[in-house]
Amino acid sequence: MANLFPKATNVVLLKAMAVLAVLGGLAPLGVWYYFTPKYSRVGYQPVQPVAFQHDLHVGQLGLDCRHCHSYVEISGQSNFPATQTCMECHQQVQQNNPKLQPVRDSWTTGKPIAWVKIHNVPDYAYFNHSAHVNRGVSCVSCHGKVNEMSVVFQDKSQSMGWCLQCHRNPEEFVRPIAATTPGGKSPIYDLDWTPPPGTSQPELGQKLVKDWKINPPKDCAGCHR
Amino acid sequence: MKRIFTHPKAPATGKKYWRSLEEFADTPEFRARLEREFPQGAAELEGTEVTRRGFMQFMGASIALAGLSLTGCRRPELHAVPYSKGVEWQVPGNALHYATSMPRRGGALPLIATTYNGRPTKLEGNPNVPGFNGSTDLFGQSAVLDLYDPDRSKVVLKARERGKDYAEATWEDFWEEFAILKRDYLKKGGDGLAILAEPSTSPTRARIRTLLQQQFPKLLWAEYDPWASQAAVQNVYDFSKADVIVALDCDFLGTTDGTVQTIAGFAAGRRRLGKTQETMSRLYAIEGRFSLTGGMADHRLRVPSSAIGSIAAQLAAAVGATGAGGAFAISSDATVNTWITELGKDLANAKGRSLVVCGSQQPAAVHDLVAQINQALGNVGVTVKPLPTFFAPAASLGDLSEQIGQGTIKTLLVLGGNPAFNGPADLHFSDVLPQVEQVIRLGLYVDETSAASTTHLPAAHFLESWGDSLAYDGTYLSQQPLILPLYDGMSELALLADLAGLPKAKGAEYIQDTFAQITGVATNAGQAFDNAWREFVHDGFLADKTLTPLGSSAPASGQTATPKPLQPGEYELNFVLGMIDDGRYANNGWLQELPDPVSKLTWDNALYLSPKTADALGIVIATANSNALDLPNTDIGPRAATLPIPDVDPMTAFPMVKVTTPDGASMELPVLVAPGQADQTLTIAVGWGRAALKLTDEAKANLTAPLRVADSTGFNVYQLRGTSTPGFVTGVKIEKIDKTYPLAITQEHNSMEGRGLVREATLDKYHEDPTFVQEIGWDKDIPQGSKTGFQNYESGYENPKLNSATYQPDRPAWGMVIDLNTCVGCSACVVACQAENNIPIVGKYQVIRGREMHWIRNDRYFASDNPPASTDARPTDSSYLDDPQMLIQPLACMQCENAPCEPVCPVNATVHNEEGLNVMAYNRCIGTRYCANNCPYKARRFNFFNYNDRPIQNVQLPVLGQTGELYLGPLAGRDGPLTYKGSPESLMLQKNPNVSVRIRGVMEKCTYCVQRIEEAKITQLRKSNESGEGSGDITLPTDSFKVACQQVCPAEAIVFGNMNDPNSKVTVAKADERGYGLLAYLGTRPRTSYLGRVRNPNMAMPGAANVGHTSVFHEDAPADKPAGTPTTSNGPARLPMNGLNLEESIG
């Protein structure tokens, strides 16, 4: 009987095994890289040009989020504050603090401060801040308790699946916009807010979803254009 | 298993609708095109430009380079850079809108500019200015691209040797020299000083000119525009009040002055067709080439342009106008005579309700005649209003040339324009200019005129400078800068003001002074002036100050020069404006790639011939055999000469002819056989064949930017156009030569199969049966149910099911209606869509392959009698092609409820949303192109290359050593092989930040401007929380926003809105009886529907029986039954009940 397989087939198995070995070796590297928070960026905490402390300004001094991020209610982008905003106070307060030197430099030269971006939504996704904060989504839902962060880091993965959790079940997240206690802050910007005693988030959320006709887009065009 | 759908066959008799000569002849090549998703060659890499082996080499090199650095593995550190000091009004992420205006020939166009972070991205019409409908035209839409054009001139240049060697200079150098110059001429009273400017309607310029002439009494002020009207007065027309309109060689729906207003008025006259007042205007067109106006006409007479004068004289006699100037030969043609007689009767019946208009390039004597006709008909003051002469007369280019010839001019300032390129051939202005000792030229580009100048100054774009102007109807408009000059340019006003000794303006001082004069509010009036001025700039116009039109005392030119009638065997060469105006927009890629609305030609101009003329010259109308490519080296520039034309569709090789004028000038031009063209008449668009100044010293190439877009496109036919013959030249000789030239024509691209695509009827038929559209095509076969017509197919799609219980009625249901009765085909929507949706241009050779990216296209159909089946109606048998009618159909994605593209997408990149949009998730698309293959409307476009990142210029391939128009990827470079990345930065500034810029391998299409829909919804959400309690109304207000194509449309032919809102315009339009869905019998349930066209023929006219008469009406039992259509045993052919469950056969 003639040889059914040519001689070259002898090495095919060896070659295949070698390829598999290489791939098998690479697989852990892939998992190590792609499956860790470093890839999804949760915990990303870059060093900022100015060591601004949210815990001090918001947590202790009680500044409202909107004091600096002033356009969050009217624009798709929540703005970073202009140097002017910092200088409102720091012309009087901490005038000679060396940590604030970059801010004073920016003010005198007019060159802006290049803050490092922590939360980065891809270019093909059109997230709109004003659509969220005006409909009962608090800052804390996406950014975590920034009021307790000394150096801000990314708290949520902000992947598409994560977005859809809320778009599919908004009642688990939406809050009233008006203060729930007399003289209190709006729950949207009060990152420590909890439902008033006697109510629960699902209960409150369902009522808001019904009253406000909340129906977040779940189709592609809601975010991708 | 393959599903094959057999479209109904066209009836063998009656009327036939066709897009091209090949379709008319039903050639096998055309059949093959119909069945393809894209034209032949579109899906192949690059024809023969790159071999497979070469491609692998190239890709291998790219991968090797990519591997050199691993930085790509980690995300880069991104920065957010806020302002250091907040900018007034500026909210990051939100657009700001400013009123401004675009200076144009005959009058400015009022605009609202959208800016993001200080960069203008889109221009819209100013809805508050009366008469403009808030709409713009294609030049208004494309102006924003000119602003960012990286090829604009950027530095002051001083000639060492004119046209050859230049050195860079600074503005300071220039001002220093200019001050000396000014002092010298002040002493001499301006003796030897001349200014050549473009005509302008700016009152400020007129004011500064007066100042100049006081200081320099001997100054020669000349003005030149190649397309300035020959008429003695400027008329403002009101087409909406006219019942009978006659256009004499006047394309008032296409390329004349003030088209936005004329189209708006005309459409209003057509829209009178309705239930309450069932009448509409009637349009007669008498013209040489088939223009858009001819396409809209109810009756069209094809005559050479030189015969218009005698026709006007005959018409004047017929309506009893007196004192006709000029001796015109009277036609002996019986048809023409009957035509004129009947036309005269129709006009006489509509006294005071009619309008006769005349093309701007007809001799002045013809304009006088037409004025008398309107006078006799009592139209003056009603439908036609002559405007007073607001601006002082100026010397002509001829006067200036004469003075230069006598050596009296020592210094010439050339402000804008490009007379060296577009000056009359007999003046040889490019040779005259170098005789002037000192020529200072202010221009947007370093162009032909700069090459003859001693100093070139970069000009500021109108979006970069302060100004003012009068609109076409005399409304006073403001013009404010949207951005600081990008390329260090200066405005014309600033230069003139400096010469006039005015102090340098920090802002709008010159305009404010004029404004004070016009309004009578002095600039030092404090708050009163501030308020008035702010209101003017904010609104963009002055509400109560327009020029008062003259009465019937409008002056006549008094000229009597008349053209000689055309002799047999002689030809007339006819010049028209194309998509790039007179050539000034030649470097605008949007306009170059915009198909001519009638011929569908892109990137070039070509000579149009009638089929009969072509036959007489022995030109074989393009067939599959004409692929012998012989590219001449001289006329089309280096690109085509070195570029191997790949093995593309042979239909793109066009024969060439040699045209010789009586003056002896001759040119070799490609020809295009144009149905509907008058015999013995050759028509060509001007403006192409531009050339940038090229320096002999290569090292200084960066001083002058090449016109990269305009480079090697078309032919400069200004060489054939003389002073006395601006519109046409008679006695031209023409001979066929043995050469061909490739033309990129889109007329057959994306052709659809099927019947009843465009539907029309006469007004009488409409009165008799308002639902006539249902009789055409297979609409009667669509299952009848509770609703009428095409709405009856059950929505078979589950994602979500739109006509079932899961559909939420409180969500909007977006829909669109396009009225074929008012759409004139101006194509402004195509450019508006391109600007709004970041649609790239692809280049001539990509268009030849059918890869153009326009999301909305205008299908142009010719309609003629169907030849009997026994005739072998090859296109050379011209009897059916000579005098067709035209219909235009804008077509974008239909947003089908049963979208055939969706089930075939393997990755769910195209899906339906709850509002009925067929949305695209670009980042999900993997480019299988199955969806485009399955789209019966061919509305999808594929990014075969990374067009947005692609160099405009031809480049040397670093690996293959070839030159070509090949996409090279991000590593490609013209500064060096590996340094240059993609698109010039300035062009990125134009992009709409709300729309993804698609990359290679992604399918794209119209999504009803989903970014505008989402913005409107979010705005309403924001408003719902105005109380801070979050409980407000989230329902969108009725018609609160417009989509881009709708917003630009001067005819308001496109209506978009929420079909669930009973008060919206679209709901009203959807209820119109003329409504039909395109290919509705397929069961796709398109959300875009059309309103059928109605023509209003005068039954007394010759040939009236054929006008608008459609015989492709429904036949219950077609003799020639479509194969494979299911039938019941005895009954007529019926469609299957479910559109998706079509005929199945083994394939």
Image (tube, coloured by chain):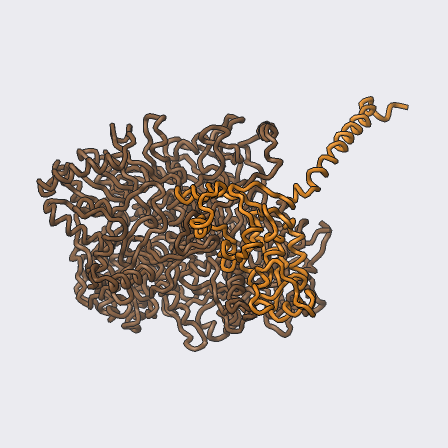
Q: Residue placed farthest to the left in the image? A: B188
Question: B593 or B1, which lies in front?
Answer: B593
Chain A's shade in the image?
A: orange
In the image, taking residue B719 as reference, residue B146 lies left or right, namely right
Q: Position of residue A12 (x, y in %)?
A: 80, 26
| Figure chain in brown | B
Vertical placement of B34 versus B954: above or below?
below
Instruction: Please tell me whether residue B291 is drawn above or below residue B628 in the rendered image.
Output: below
Q: Quadrant of residue B779?
A: bottom right
> In which quarter of the view is residue B1135 placed?
bottom right
- Depth check: B777 or B84 in front? B84
**Left or right: where does residue B637 sit relative to residue A42?**
left
Q: Can the viewer see residue A123 in this picture?
A: yes
Is any part of residue B1082 visible from this angle? no
Image check: B250 left or right of B232? right
Q: Residue A198 at what x, y percent from top left?
A: 69, 70
**Total numbered badges shown on the rendered structure:** 0
Furthest residue toward top: A7
Nearest the eye: B189 or B508: B508
Residue A199's quadrant in the figure?
bottom right
Asked if residue B478 lies left or right of residue B789, the reply is left
Residue lying furthest right in this view?
A1
Tell me where residue B788 appears, x and y as whole percent.
Answer: 59, 72
Relative to B1028, say whether A2 is above or below: above
**Percent of width and height locating residue B795:** 65, 65
